[in-house]
Image (spheres, rainbow, N blue to C red):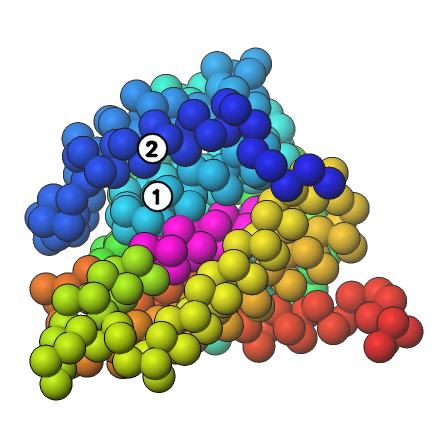
Amino acid sequence: MDFNLSDEQKQLADAVHRFIDRSYDFESRRAAYRSEAGFSDQAWGALVELGLTALPVPEAQGGFSGTAVDMMVVQQELGRGLVIEPYLATVVAAHALKLAGGQEALLEQVAGGEARLAVAFNEPEARYALNHVRVTAKVSGGEGRLDGRKVVVIHGAQADKLVVSARTSGADADEAGISLFVVDRHAAGVAVRDYRTIDNLRAADITFTDAPATLLGTAGQGWEILEATADYAAVLLCAEAVGIIDALNAATLEYAKTRQQFNSPIGRFQALQHRMVEMFIHAEQARSITVLAAGRFDEATPEERRRFVSAAKARVGQAARAVGQEAVQIHGGMGVTDELPAAHMFKRLTLINTTFGDVDHHVGRFARQPGFQQAA
C-alpha cells in the first residue's frame, strides 16, 4: 500500500489550507456559529467553489469520484480550521445515496452546492446501535410514510433533504427490515427542533408524523448501506480529528514558548517537554491508523472495512482525549475559556469521539469481528 499522497491530493490540501488561513479565522467562525443559521453562507460558497461538494460525487453526476483518501485529505484541513459548515453531514448522506442508487438528480444538486443533506440515524436510548430503529414506515411502491423520532441529527435543521433509517418489518434491534428513505426537511409532518451542540455545531431532534418519504434501494434491505455509510462517516471523523490534533499540538507548543514562569518559558521545563512529545506520538499514531483505514476503505470487504474503521476510530478517540487533556493542562485555566481556540478544539475532539461510536464501542466491535479470537 502506497502511503504517499498524489500530486493532485497535495494540491487539494494546499487549496483548502489557503482558504482556511485567508478566510476562516477564529473570529469569523465565532460570528458564524452565533448566527441564526449556525454557519456562514459565504464559507459554504467557498467550499462549493473549491469543488469540495463535488469531490465525492460520481463523475456521471457532475462530481470527481473522489476516494476515501481524497476525502481524508480534505477533512484533515477542515479539522485544522474547525470548520462548522454542514459539509461532513452532506457528504456522508451523499455516500448513502451513491450506495443505494436512483438519486442521480439529487447527487447533481449536491455536487453543485445547491442541496445540503444530513443523515438521521440516531434514536433515543439506542446509543451507538444503529440497528435499534423504532421509526416506522409504511411503503407503497417507491414511496413511504414515516412515524417516529430521530435525535441529535447533526446539521439536521440546515439540510434540505434527510436520509432517514426506518423500520418496515422486524423487531426493534433486527438488522433485517430496516429501510432507508429520503425526506424533504420542509415536508408536512416533519417537525424540527434545532439547537447548538457544545462544539458549536448544530444538531436537531426531528419528529415524523405520517411524513412523506422516498424509498432508497429495496425495502427492508437497508442495513448494509446504513452500516457502510456510518463507517464512511467514522473514517472522515478520524481524519478531521487528526487535523484538529495537529492544530492543538501546534497551539500548545506556541503557548509553551511564550508563557513565562520563574522568568523562563514553560516550554523549557523538561516535564512539559516530555508531555508534548507524548502528544506528538499520539498524533502520529492517529494519523497512521487513519491513513490505513482510508486507504483500504474503498476496496475492502465488509469484514475488513469493519476492522479497519473500528481500529481507527478507537485509536483516534484515545489520541484525541489524551492530546486534548494534556493541552488543557499545559494551557492552564486559559485552556477551557471561550476566548482560546484550544478550548474549542478540545470540545470538538470530545464530540468526534462520541459520534458514530466511542472508543469502547469500537474496541468491542473490533473484538467481535471474525478471526479476532483465533488470532488472539
Position of residue 334 measured from the top left corner of the image (x, y, whole percent): 14, 74
Which structural element holds mark 2?
Answer: helix
| Quarter of the rendering containing residue 252 | bottom left
Q: As shown in the figure, which amino acid type bears the numbered disc 1?
A: Leu
Left or right: residue 191 versus residue 264 is: right
> Which residue, given by chain and number where applicable, does mark 1 sit on?
78
- Magenta stretch bounds: 229-247
- Residue 123 can be seen, yes or no: no
Which secondary structure type mostly characterizes the magenta part of the structure? Answer: helix
The stretch drawn in magenta includes residue 81: no
Single out the residue that lies furthest toward the right.
374
| Quarter of the rendering containing residue 273 | bottom left
Which mark sits nearer the N-terminus, 2 or 1? 2
Residue that appears at 74% across and 73% down: 367
- Residue 96 can be seen, yes or no: yes
Mark on residue 16? 2
Which structural element holds mark 1?
Answer: helix
Position of residue 42 measured from the top left corner of the image (x, y, whole percent): 17, 30
Report the front residue among 120 and 172.
120
The stretch drawn in magenta includes residue 231: yes
Please state, as top left, top right, bottom left or bottom right, where the N terminus lies in the image: top right
Report the front residue among 90 and 166.
90
Position of residue 40 measured from the top left corner of the image (x, y, whole percent): 17, 38
The relative height of residue 373 versus residue 49 in the rendered view (above or below) is below
Asked if the residue at tag 1 contacts the one at tag 2, i.e. Cβ–Cβ closer than 8 Å, the answer is: yes
Q: As shown in the figure, which amino acid type bears the numbered disc 2?
A: Val
Report the front residue among 357 and 72.
72
